[in-house]
Amino acid sequence: MVSANTDLTYNSKIEGDVIVSRADAVINWIRTNSMWPMPMGLACCAIELMAVAASRFDIARFGAEVMRFSPRQSDVMIVSGTVTYKMATAVRRIYDQMAAPKWVIAMGACASTGGMYRSYAVLQGVDRILPVDVYVSGCPPRPEALLDAVIRLQEKVKREPSARRLFSA
Amino acid sequence: MATDFTFPDSAARNAAGEAEPEKMSLSMGPSHPSTHGVLRLQMELDGEIVTKADPVVGYLHRGDEKIAENMTYNQFVPYTDRLDYLAPLANNMAYAIAVERLAKLEVPPRCQAIRVITAELARISSHLMGLGAYAIDVGAWTVFLYTFGEREKLYRLFEELTGARFTTSYTRIGGLARDVPDGWLKHVAQFCEQFPPILEESMKLLTRNKIFMDRTVGIGVISSEDAIAYGLTGPNARGSGVPLDLRRDRPYSGYEQYEFDVPVATGGDCYDRYLVRGEEMRQAVRIIRQAVAKFPDGPWFAADAKRIFAPPKDKVLTSMEELIQNFMLVTEGPQMPAGEVYFEAENPKGVLGFYIVSKGGGVPWRLKIRSPSFCNLSILPKVCVGALLADIVAILGSFDFVMGECDR
Amino acid sequence: MPSDDNPRSESAATAFKARFPQAVDRPSLDHPAVDIPAADVPALLKFLKEESGFDMLADLTAVDWAAGASPRFTVVYHLYSTARHDYIRLAAGCPDDSAPVMPSVTSLWPGANWHEREVFDMFGIRFEGHPDLRRILMWEGYPYHPLRKEFPLAGIETPLPDLEVAAETGAGLKPAPMMGGPFVASTGQINLTEAEPGAKDESWTERHEKPKP
């Protein structure tokens, strides 16, 4: 007896626990929901970064509370604070040590453009040495602004052609 | 950088002809969770014991002193926020008083009372952060979350008063940016009511905790002679038995009206410094309660400071004289007489000093910031020798320094 | 307001000036201040530390009076007495304007070690007798002394300290884009036309490169 399939959604009795989807969707979904930050906490923005990790703003809701200071275990480097020329070399080295796929959030005015420190010792924006994905303005940005940046980064990652990159030579 | 290390010489022999133990060079930082910012410690280890420690600072040197030579006195206030960024209101106050000393300007009692309340709230905020970060370094996550919860309440108070959670830029030369809003003092009093029990609870997790005591008692001992010789100030000096506190010894901004104790410990180890900070928080609450109770009415900016403090905005928009005055103040800055001053304030981290050399006009000729963390860190090469590697983390946490202030 | 003209601190400073005639009064708005010759700095500071009770070195810094002034560099010491709770300021001009030198006081206060390194880093003043005089805030090998008056706030182009990273990123220490700023009047001038909020140097912006001299 043939009956029309009126189900509009996934029905495990029919599909048998097999979901068919695009590889990109699955890979990006996994990546966005467990983005472990590498907190490059340099100055005052680092305190707001810690406030985001604390209980009121709770970055754990986004799967990102694992702030390991180890570059090998992180996905996104959150550059929070003024990058001086002396520190720039260390920041770049740590970025190089991160495993792909990796992203960078430039948090705050100092990381984005050098901020109010237009002086001889400050790198005018971390994008002079790193490719930045999301810039957050503010001095320091409110924790909500940083969470907004995390969400924007998640949306950016969701649009990436990950499967092609992963499976290509 | 690879060229910084000198690798141990495996052919080295000591006087008796025995092979020298091979020492390992370890560089801790500048990006490290326990260095409280960008401090780099180049250490030489013999097994687990540190034989030589050389701190490398300057990773956050932003050129504040050079910037100060190009900014008017009021334009520099946001830079003072970002010195000790855990207690910006205290830095704001220290800088404002230093510049006011240059002009020999007295601010009215209400302004002084507001400055004292905000400085003590900043002290609580800074010590909570120090406590939380110290606890998390030594392994106690919970204390960090509790203290940050309290800090969020403080941030709410700061935001209500100044508009920013921290980096407040609240003081101006000759007064403040704005008066206290209605109801703020009530909120401060409510905070002071609910804070002590939570502080006791957080400290109870650590004070008689065997693991915490094992990690901090007897570690990082600093004698009081060393504390004075190296210029240690604040809780680090008071933890070593040096009873210095500028609020009591050279009162400024009306501190002489308030009754408070200055905790001094005699041991000089990490545990003592932790206890001193805890007690200072309780004393800060005591000062705030007195200040709120005695809160005076009156103006909140210095009178008769025509070339220094901006006139009220409604006058600026309607009256010609005030308009010109405002214009000159904004473009040229508060006009200060020529001369030199040095003023030190008791900040949460220690003694923050401003040495200002003025040749007249609105821009200083030289501004030197005497930073407590810079002086506190100078004792590290001596304190770290002989400690175990795990103790270094405890020592750094007990110093409670901040690199923004150290490097300026 | 604490009495900076409190009799005990005045008497310590007066006794000091009477004992050492080479210590000359220095104009000061708050604490007692004296000018002393550079060669006498260790001896006089030792006296103040051991005999006068100024046991703590509060601050050690320097001032650059710009090329043309002589002495061009003055090293300023602030001493604090933990017993009497007062300060004294001592200023010593460096004898040589082009290669300034000053005796070190690290033997009196070990804490002066880092202060003197910072003064060396920022001004280029060498301290004789310092155990380890090297840069502290800028990296080793940085060629300039930033707080000297002729050094521009924006900085001078220099290669990055780490050659690998410099090669990889193509970045170097470039002068900060001042856009002709900072937008503030010059020190000490109260002239309305010159006090207009204009750029200090209007010959260049971020789009138009600064014309090479």
Image (spheres, rainbow, N blue to C red):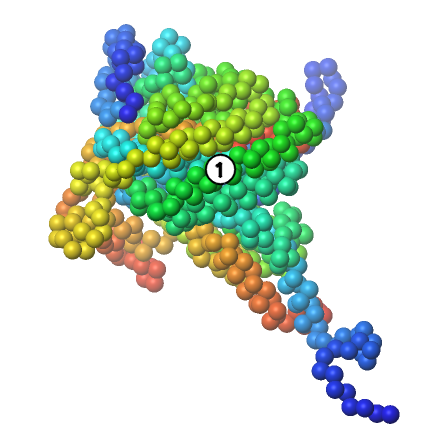
Label 1: few (<14), some (14–19) or many (≥20) C-alpha neighbours in 10 Å: few
| Vertical order, C99 against A115 (above or below) | above
- Residue B179 as seen in the image, left or right of residue B308: right
Amino acid residing under circle 1:
Glu
User: Mark 1 falls on what kind of element?
Assistant: helix
Q: Nearer the viewer, residue B259 or C53?
A: B259
The residue sitting at 39% across, 30% down in the picture is B290
Can the viewer see residue B108 in this picture? yes
Can the viewer see residue B39 in this picture? no
| Vertical order, A69 against B27 (above or below) | below
The residue sitting at 81% across, 91% down in the picture is A3
The residue most toward the right is A1
- Quarter of the image for residue B40 reads top right
Q: Nearer the viewer, residue B359 or B334?
A: B334
Which x, y percent locates residue B195?
52, 37
The residue most toward the left is B320
Which x, y percent locates residue B121?
44, 37
Quarter of the image for the C terminus of chain A: give it. bottom right
State the residue position of label 1.
Answer: B193
Which x, y percent locates residue A90?
56, 46
Which x, y percent locates residue B22?
71, 28
Q: Nearer the viewer, residue B395 or C166?
A: B395
